[in-house]
Image (cartoon, rainbow, N blue to C red):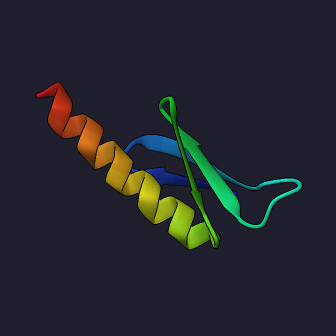
């Protein structure tokens, strides 16, 4: 599944041999039990990185 955060593309996929999903974007990797949880964690990670770059 492919979604977006602003103009950034986020790829969400099922993790093989594990329970849950992962999201990848801009050299970040997050995991969650559901696709939504992985996406929400990615949003938080991108927000943290954005603050650090300022």
Residue found 55% across the figure and 61% down from its top = 38
Residue found 52% across the figure and 69% down from its top = 37
Counting from the top left corner in percent of width and height, residue 1 is at 70, 57
Determine whether 8 is above or below 35 in the image.
Answer: above
Q: Point out the image quarter for the C terminus.
A: top left
Residue found 27% across the figure and 47% down from its top = 47
Asked where in the image residue 34 lies, by quadrant, the reply is bottom right
Counting from the top left corner in percent of width and height, residue 20 is at 72, 66
Residue extending furthest left? 54
Counting from the top left corner in percent of width and height, residue 3 is at 56, 55
- Tell me: 21 left or right of 31: right
Foreground of the two, 53 or 10: 53
Residue extending furthest front? 18
Counting from the top left corner in percent of width and height, residue 17 is at 89, 55
Residue found 86% across the figure and 53% down from its top = 16
Determine whether 23 is above or below 34 in the image.
Answer: above
Numbered-mark total: 0
Residue extending furthest right? 17
- Tell me: 53 left or right of 11: left
């Amino acid at each position: 599944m492919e979604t977006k955060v602003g103009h950034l593309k986020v790829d969400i996929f099922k993790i093989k041999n594990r329970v849950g999903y992962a999201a990848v974007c801009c050299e970040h990797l997050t995991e969650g039990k559901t696709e939504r949880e992985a996406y929400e964690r990615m949003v938080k990670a991108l927000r943290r990185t954005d603050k650090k770059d300022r």
